[in-house]
Image (spheres, rainbow, N blue to C red):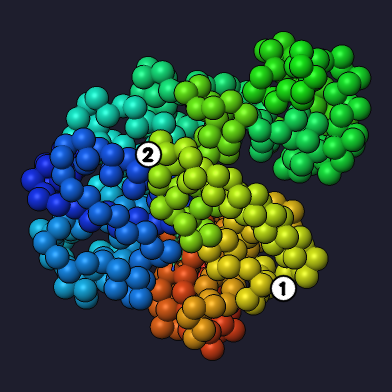
Amino acid sequence: MSLENDLQRAADIINEAESVTVVSHIDADGISTEAILAQALAREGIPVTSVFVRQLEPMAMRHVPKDGSLKLFADLGAGQQNLLEEHGLSADEVLILDHHVGQPCGTLYPQVNTLDHGITRMSAAGVAYMVAKAIDSTNIDLAKLAVIGNVGDMMARENCGLVGPAREIVSDGVEYGNILVRDHDLNCYGTSTRPIHTCLGYCDDPYIDGISNNTNAALRFLERLGVELKNPRGGWLVWEELPFDDRRTIISALVQQLIAYGRDTDRLLAETYIFPDEPERTPLRNASEYATLLNACGRWAKPRTGSSICHGERGEAYRDAEQMLAHHRTVIRDLLQYILEAGVTELSHLQYIHTGDRFPDTIVGIGAGMALSKLNWKKPMMVLSAMVDEPEMTKVSMRTNEWAIARGVDLQEALVEAAAEVGGAGGGHRIAAGAFIPHDTEEVFVDGVNRILKRQFAQADTDDC
Ligand code: C5P
Ligand code: C5P
Ligand code: C5P
């Protein structure tokens, strides 16, 4: 079936439902996915209830109600179809909207999975948006939420941003008027919220010698360029507010600085997505900061706060989210520092660290991704962490990069296989995957993953010949 047919079938299933339960994931993509679906369904007058889960695992299935509603699994489900079957769900009460690698079972659940159509750079929010648009073509105001999901799940391509069907979603938002695209923009966190020297001083990917980790030096660097850094009232401007020419002047100087220190300039620039309908100088103003805000809500157990924000609520929910965002960013920094200071154990084909119960298992994957670029980036990175609420289980998160993928690495395959060998369960993508395993099998499991990665690297070598 073509993608269009899959989308139309999904829209038909939803339109015929008396009521819907959306089961979604707690990260930025999962929250924006839920918000798209809940709004699109409410507009059709279909009653919706939402359930957020950390991961679709046996314990989480308790939260899936046994009632007559259509169960809409979004940003999860494709990799856990056997669980749906074990839970007694039949094909006519389930719809899966996902972008994770599927693990089919005996029941043929209806689904839209972009991977089935060769689309790798699309988040679940993008899938949800395409379904919302198939339900009613006027739903294009929701494109903005799909862009947040795509950016949150890192679906953009370095240098050219969102591509393929994800690009068409951006165009819908531009047409509707709630997205502005800036190409070759500064790829630093805080371009809508932080004074420019703070934004640059906190940026360490890419590492800019003489600027990264030193906001005072960053300020002196900017002052030497003669760019106006303050508004007429004397307050600091943020990057987004700078005139075009000043942004170019600063970017040229940063490029020169990187080149002078023999560093790669690739990561300095990215396409950014600005939301002109949101209040200025808030994290809601661009896709990257908005996604981080949602991640903060979800990973700190308040996905509903994130969802309310996506629905347009701005009062108490927003203040709550801002606090979680500040906390989230502090803990992520601590996590990265811990990994770098404690050091990883290197095996032949992977590197790993066990963070014990120091950090919540919901954020260790983010740390794995950040640490990878600072460690041996050729070896896939694994973080193991204790699950406080399920002490007999260990959470595993892995991250790799395009370099390793081009050499045959597939973390989803490796974790599914190695987890199954020890009685656990894994899933995800080639580039980012996770698993839950019994805690007394950690050693065997790590060795198993190393063995599978060795096989994957070797296989690709043979394929090349
Ligand atoms: O749950 P889920 O699919 O949403 O998680 C995907 C994860 O993969 C995210 O944490 C995202 O940051 C990560 N990712 C990555 N590198 C990419 C693409 C995605 O680390 N190139
Ligand atoms: O939790 P983490 O961010 O490391 O997850 C990386 C990817 O692996 C996500 O796409 C997540 O949905 C998936 N995952 C999974 N099964 C698990 C844990 C994570 O499919 N048990
Ligand atoms: O877009 P491109 O085809 O270059 O994607 C490179 C690889 O990254 C693909 O194999 C894709 O499956 C993988 N990827 C992924 N999960 C993501 C992002 C990219 O598996 N979240």
Mark 2 → mark 1, Cα distance in angstroms? 44 Å
Please tell me which residue lies in front, 295 or 88. Answer: 295
First in sequence: mark 2 or mark 1? 2
**Residue 206: x and y, percent?**
74, 40
Q: Residues within 10 Å of mark 2 (few under 14, many from 20)?
A: some
Q: Amino acid at mark 1?
A: Thr
The residue at 63%/68% (across/down) is 359
Q: Position of residue 212 (x, y in %)?
A: 82, 40
Q: How many marks?
A: 2
Instruction: Name the residue type under label 2.
Output: His
Quadrant in the picture for residue 338? bottom right
Return the mark for residue 74: none
Image quarter in which the N terminus is found: top left
Q: Residue 434 location, x and y as percent? A: 49, 65
Q: Which of 103 and 234 lies nearest the eye of the viewer?
A: 234
Mark 2: which secondary structure? loop
Is 454 displayed left or right of 231 in the figure?
A: left
Task: Kindly identify which numbered label has been placed on residue 345.
Answer: 1
Taking the spot 72% from the left edge, 11% from the top edge, the residue there is: 245
Tell me: residue 12, above or below residue 357. above
Which numbered mark, 2 or 1, is in the foreground of this view? 2
Q: Identify the residue at horizontal 80%, vertical 66% (top origin).
A: 341
The location of residue 7, given as percent across then percent down, is 20, 39
> Which residue is more in the foreground, 371 or 309?
309
User: Which of the numbered marks, if any, corresponds to residue 311?
Assistant: 2
Label 2 beta carbon less than 8 Å to ligand 1: no
Q: Does any portion of residue 52 appear in the rendered image?
A: yes
**Vertically, is 169 above or below 331?**
above
Q: Is residue 464 above or below residue 433?
A: above
